[in-house]
């Protein structure tokens, strides 16, 4: 019998469960390595070479190089791990979160100042907005 | 005998730590956030707790995917501040209370909560931001802190019910400790927020308000809320709020030992970066 995953119909949301964690193990552990200043320097000096030291899939490496966080998450990345890439790039958590929404940095910041993204229409996929 | 005098609840947004560290607390964007803690700073100075039992979650800093403990109690003499990728926050190291922490671990495990015991661990913003909000920028934190880390990174986090019952077991453990310590228990994280995917930026003020109301007046009922309600209504990272139920479960009234707690302070503000900030102080009667 398969596990119940009631969170599959939450729009625009990927829950980092055991299946995603298994898929993203090496991607996330690569991110973890960026907690050390010397690794951040080495990564920045030659990103592709640094990534090639990790047994990640080619798709995962390309997603990191493109800083496509939605793609990274689809391939098993977790936002708290991926945040280390943003930190290495000198980005704030707000810049990282905003980059996944299709909004500009200003648009996202203004949305937050105005009270954030509304829950109305955002509970279920396919829900009428 | 040790006692729990009060519980404190607060969000632990990393940008709040950065705002403090970079001297931005008086800026118009941040002033409303920090203004909500003016009372709390004074209150904490007057309360002079001997130990703070601080429930938080690690954000892939002490624990990578190599090891994912659901409940981890820090029993070390001291804890270093983690480099989360931006360099370590310029805040004091955390002094632990190994004797009380060890006592709690032994008691709680015998009460069927299988804690992971951690003798070496760096602590991240989940723990240091609440301390900064409540203490400002001291040279040293005002008292020893027992870090208690809960997994909310890989789904599933422990259920609200499990957290609430664990709080009760922690209270029992603290009350059976021989020294007359004044202990506070803090629950941190939340409130509504989502940091990932196209739904990032979600805020649900109605949910948050109801959560605060029920945490005060109906924690038993609130503890039965399933994970999916947190995820759907409060965002994928809003699930951190289960940690507040550990602190609430440790209060006297829900253990048949006193009147409902006094609400000494309540605060709510949107936004701090991506997140709704919520804060409560409850005192045992």
Image (cartoon, rainbow, N blue to C red):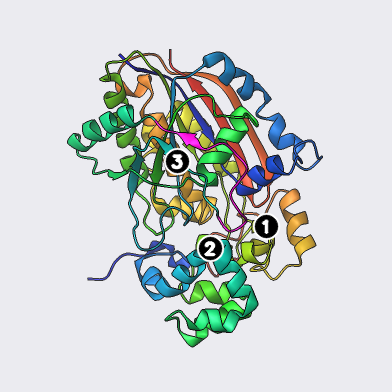
- Looking at the image, residue B116 sits to the left or right of residue B126; the answer is left
Q: Quadrant of residue A11?
A: bottom right
Judge by depth and name the residue closer to the eye, B165 or A59: A59
The magenta stretch spans residue B32: no
Q: Quadrant of residue B222?
A: top left
Residue A66 place in picture, x, y as percent: 63, 80
- Which segment did they paint magenta? B84-96
By secondary structure, the bulk of the magenta-drawn segment is best described as: loop
Question: Pointers 3 and 2 in contact (CB under 8 A)?
Answer: no
- Looking at the image, residue B99 sits to the left or right of residue B51; the answer is left
Up/down of B176 relative to A2, above or below: above
Please report whichever mark, 1 or 2, sits nearer to the chain's N-terminal start: 2
Is the N terminus of chain B in the top left, top right, bottom left or bottom right quadrant?
Answer: top left
Q: CA distance from mark 3 to mark 1?
A: 28 Å
- Looking at the image, residue B279 sits to the left or right of residue B169; the answer is right
Residue B123 place in picture, x, y as percent: 48, 45
Query: Regarding mark 3 in the picture, which secondary structure is present there?
Result: strand
Give the labeled residue for mark 2.
A79
Residue at the location (62% across, 44% down)? B276
- Label 3: few (<14), some (14–19) or many (≥20) C-alpha neighbours in 10 Å: many
Up/down of A78 relative to B42, above or below: below
Is the C terminus of chain B in the top left, top right, bottom left or bottom right quadrant?
Answer: top left
Say whether mark 2 and mark 3 are on the same chain.
no
The tag on residue A94 is 1
């Amino acid at each position: 019998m398969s596990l119940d995953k009631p969170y599959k119909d939450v729009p625009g949301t990927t829950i980092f469960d055991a299946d995603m964690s298994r898929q993203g193990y090496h991607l996330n552990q690569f991110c973890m390595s960026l907690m050390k200043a010397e690794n951040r320097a080495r990564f920045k000096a030659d990103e592709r070479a640094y990534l090639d030291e990790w047994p990640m899939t080619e798709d995962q490496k390309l997603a990191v190089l493109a800083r496509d966080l939605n793609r990274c998450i689809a391939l098993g990345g977790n936002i708290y791990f991926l945040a280390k890439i943003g930190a290495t790039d000198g980005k704030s958590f707000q810049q990282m979160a905003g980059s996944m929404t299709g909004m500009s940095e200003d648009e996202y910041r203004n949305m937050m100042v105005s009270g954030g993204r509304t829950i109305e229409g955002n509970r279920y996929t396919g829900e009428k907005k | 005998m040790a006692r729990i005098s009060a519980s404190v609840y607060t969000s632990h947004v990393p940008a709040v730590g950065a705002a403090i560290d970079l001297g931005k607390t008086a800026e118009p964007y941040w002033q409303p956030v920090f203004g909500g803690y003016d009372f709390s700073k004074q209150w904490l100075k007057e309360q002079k707790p001997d130990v703070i039992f601080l429930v938080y979650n690690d954000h892939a800093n002490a624990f990578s995917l190599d090891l994912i403990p659901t409940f981890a109690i820090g029993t070390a003499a001291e804890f270093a501040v983690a480099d989360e990728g931006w360099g370590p926050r310029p805040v004091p190291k955390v002094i632990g209370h190994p004797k009380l922490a060890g006592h709690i671990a032994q008691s709680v495990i015998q009460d069927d909560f299988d804690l992971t015991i951690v003798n070496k661990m760096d602590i991240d913003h989940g723990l240091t931001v609440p301390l900064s909000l409540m203490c400002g920028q001291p040279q040293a934190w005002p008292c020893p802190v027992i870090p208690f880390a809960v997994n909310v990174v890989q789904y599933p986090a422990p259920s609200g019910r499990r957290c609430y019952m664990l709080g009760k077991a922690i209270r029992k453990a603290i009350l059976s400790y021989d020294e007359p310590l004044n202990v506070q228990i803090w629950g941190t994280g939340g409130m509504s927020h989502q940091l990932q995917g196209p739904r990032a930026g979600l805020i649900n003020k109605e949910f948050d308000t109801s959560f605060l109301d029920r945490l005060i007046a109906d924690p038993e009922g609130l503890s039965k809320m399933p994970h999916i309600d947190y995820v759907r209504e409060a965002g994928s990272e809003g699930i951190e709020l289960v940690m507040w139920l550990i602190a609430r479960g440790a209060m006297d009234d829900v253990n048949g030992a006193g009147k409902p707690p006094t609400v000494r302070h309540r605060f709510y503000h949107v936004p701090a970066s991506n997140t709704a900030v919520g804060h409560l102080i409850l005192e045992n009667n």
